[in-house]
Amino acid sequence: MPDSRLPPLTPPPDPHPRRPRLAAPPGAIDCHVHLFGPVSRYPFHPGSKYRSADALPETNIALQDTLGLAGAVVVSGAGYGPNTDHLAEVLQRFPTRFRGVALLPDDVKREHVARLDALGVRGARFVSAGHAGALPRLSPRVAGLIAEFGWHVQFYPHGTDLLDHADALIALPNRIVLDHFACIPASGGVEQPAFQRLLALLDTGRVWVKMSGPMRCTAENYPYASVTPVARALVRHAPERLLWGSDWPHTNMQGRQMPNDGDLFDLLETWCDDAAVRQQILVNNPREIYGIFRNDTEPA
């Protein structure tokens, strides 16, 4: 009988990702994935709001191959809280296919950051108070520490609360990467104040945004129609500061339609019909933020 005290098991991703119609340019990078397991070695943090079946690096590498990608950025899963052991092992085992973004404890020391930096971690993730779970909140001390290593701050807003955090983010010494279309409700359209503030942040030249997780800013199912005008507006405004991510394995999708990852990749053609701009988003921009991947023969 299931233990009612445990958080729910998140639904698994579609186990049969199809090959996309859209051909990825050589060197394309998925800038947002989570990996989990094996659970026998890496139990979930007691403060996690969810649990996941194993989502192993080998499975994600097979997905990369299906989608035509050269690598991915592992964002340390909220399920592990500020424990970086799992992320460190993945980066050590698969240095040519992954870079990392870590969830760090509030009291993290310079030596810990240095070890992760050597493994390929290039940023630290923080979330706004609207997100539950064992997740770090914005810390100027930690942001200053990781800035010494050239790391960016990855920030996950909630709803329209980018408006509440914009000034604090831009005051940090780091470059800023915003998750999942900055989580701005797509139903509010491109004229809403939060989206206009996002455009202003992009204009600073220090802020990037991930075109990832469209299901995080709308309750719609695929193809997330209300996200399309938002994505197109971002492509018109600042294509040089956009990143794409699959958000695999799509946690916390209870009661919703699970998308196929081939379909998700094909959305990029709907959002951006210019192959040269897609090359920038998929190949050039990731290397600006995460550096050269170890399977690159030369800078993109």
Image (tube, rainbow, N blue to C red):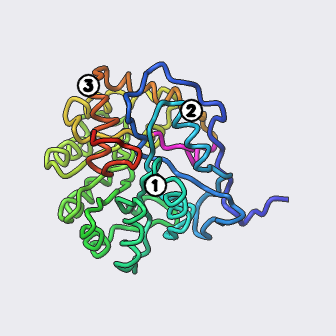
Residue 34 x/y as whole percent: 52, 51
Q: Main secondary structure of the magenta part?
A: loop
Element carrying mark 2: loop
| Rendered residue at 50%/23% (across/down) | 20
What residue is disc 2 on? Answer: 259
Q: Label 1, label 2: how many angstroms apart (C-alpha)?
A: 20 Å
Q: Quadrant of the N terminus?
A: bottom right
What are the residue bounds of the magenta stretch?
246-254
| Rendered residue at 47%/65% (across/down) | 135
Q: Label 1, label 3: how many angstroms apart (C-alpha)?
A: 27 Å
Residue 174 x/y as whole percent: 23, 62
Toward the viewer: 129 or 17? Answer: 17
Amino acid on which disc 3 is placed: Ala
Q: Nearer the viewer, mark 1 or mark 2?
A: 1
Element carrying mark 1: strand
Q: Is residue 22 magenta?
A: no
What residue is disc 1 on? Answer: 75
Residue 6 x/y as whole percent: 70, 63
| Rendered residue at 14%/49% (across/down) | 204
Closer to the chain start, of discs 1 and 3, is: 1
Does 41 sit above or below residue 295? below
- Residue 276's label in the rendered image is 3
